[in-house]
Image (cartoon, rainbow, N blue to C red):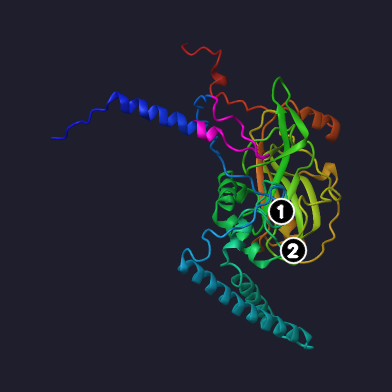
Amino acid sequence: MLALRRVQPWALGFAQRSATKQVALASTAVDTDGSHSQSSDEPVAPQKHQSRAIRTRRPRISLQHPREWNRPLAFGVLPAFDEALKVIKEDSMALKDEVTALEGAIAREKETPQHDQHALRVMEDKLRILEVQSEINFPQVRWKCANGMGKQVPDWTPSADMSKAVDRHLLEQRWRKEGALDLLMERIHQMKVVPDVLPDIHPSLDLRVNFPKIKSNAGLQATVSKTVYEYVEPGVFLLPEQTVEPPKIYTTVFHPEERLYTLLMIDPVTDFPDETNKTFQTYLHWLQPNIPLSSVSPSPVPNLNTHTAYIPPHPQRGTNYHRYTILLLPQHSRLSIHMVAKDKRTCFDVRAFMEKHGLDKNVGGGVHMWREVWSEGVPAVYKEILKTAEPKFGRMPKADRYGDFRGKKRYV
C-alpha cells in the first residue's frame, strides 16, 4: 500500500514565503534608465498573472499587409529537407536551359519564309509546359501564388503574377479543382441554363459579377449602396433595385496573348412572356463585342457599355423567377455588329447570332447567372428606361368543364 505523506504546517509557510520572495525579486527589475522601479526594503505584494490574448485567426496577407515566405525548417535541422530543395533547384536549372534552347529554336523557325505552323504550335506548347515545370516545385512559388503576393487586385480575388506561366497554371488548377468551376456548372445545369440558352457550355475563364450591396430592405422598396459592390454567387436571387446599373465584370484569363470576346446578357426563353403570341421569348439586355482580354488585362473590365446599352432586369409582375445569364463568347477575329435598339431586344436568338458571327461555344469562354423576381423597383425601370406601361400577368384561368351544364335542370 502507498502511504500518503503528511505536509507539515511549517512547510506550507516556507513555500508561501519563498513565493513572496520570488515575486519581490521579479518586481525589482531594472528600468531602461538603470534605476530600480522599487527599493528592496519596501514590502511588495504578489502580482496577479496576466494572460495574453490568444490570436483567433491567421494574420491577413495581402499587398497592403505583406509577409515574406520563410523556410518551415532552418538549414541543418533536417538534412533530407535541405537535400530536397537542392534537387529541386538543380532540376529547375536544367529545365531552364531547355527553355532557353527551345526559345531559340522557335525564333529560328519563325524566321524561315515558309515555316511549319503545326511544328511551331507543338514547340510553343512544349515551351509553356517547360516554363511551368521549371518553377512549380519551389515551395515559395506556391506560397506566393496561394497568398496573393503577385500584383495589385481586390482583396477578395485570388491573385498571382499572371505574367508568369507557373502562376497562371496554379490559379487555373485552383479554379478547376477547388470548387469554383464545379459550383458554376452545377447551378447552370440545375437552373436549366443548359439547354435553354445553349446546348452545352465549356468555360475556359473565370467570370465574376459584382452588384451593389443592399443597405436596407425595410419597407416596400430596398435601398442599395452606390459605392460598395459585392460578389454574386452563381444562381442566387438578387433584387431589381441592385441591378439598375451595369455590374462590374471581373475576369481571370489564363492565356497570355490577347484575344477578343463578345459579351451577351439575356433573359432566356421560357422566362420572358410574349403577350401577342401567348408564349415566351428571349430578351437581350446587353451586347458588347470585341472585348480584348488576356491574363494581364485590368479588372474590372472597362468600357463595356459602348455598344448595345445595358437595360436593367425587369421581371414582370405575376411571372416566375427569371434567369439572367451573362456569356463571354470567344471570337476568331474582329466583328462588325450593328447596335440593337430598345424595341428590337425581344425574340433574340442566341444560337442564330453565334452561327451568323462565327462564335463557337466549344472553344471556351465564360458564363454567369443569377435569378430575380418582381419587386417594387420594377415599375421605375418601365417608366424611366423602357418608357412603356408595366404589364401585369396572372395564371391562366382553369377551364370549367361543367360550365355548360350549370343552371340547367338535371332531373326532368
Query: Looking at the picture, which amino acid does disc 1 mark?
Result: Thr
Front in this rendered view, residue 253 or 34 = 34
Q: Is residue 202 visible?
A: no
What is the C-alpha distance between the residues marked 1 and 2? 23 Å
Q: Is residue 313 magenta?
A: no
Q: Residue at x 81, y 29 (%)?
A: 380
Question: Which secondary structure, mark 1?
Answer: strand
Q: Is residue 28 magenta?
A: yes
Q: Residue at x 56, y 23 (%)?
A: 400
Question: Which secondary structure, mark 2?
Answer: loop
Q: Which residue is mark 2?
A: 358
Front in this rendered view, residue 341 or 50 = 50
Q: Residue furthest left?
A: 1
Front in this rendered view, residue 334 or 198 = 334
**Span colored in magenta:** 24-42
Task: Answer above or below: position of 64 versus 404.
Answer: below
Left or right of residue 233, residue 333 in this image:
right
Residue 232 at x, y = what percent?
66, 41
Q: Quadrant of residue 10?
A: top left
Q: Which residue is mark 1?
A: 251
**Closer to the eye: label 1 or 2:** 1
Q: Is residue 199 visible?
A: yes
Q: Quadrant of residue 243?
A: top right
Going from N to C along the chain, the mark reached first, 1 or 2, is: 1
- Mark 1 touches mark 2? (CB < 8 Å): no
Residue 178 at x, y = what percent?
55, 53
Residue 213 at x, y = what percent?
71, 34
Front in this rendered view, residue 257 or 12 = 12
Secondary structure, magenta segment, majority class:
loop
Query: Looking at the picture, which amino acid does disc 2 mark?
Result: Gly
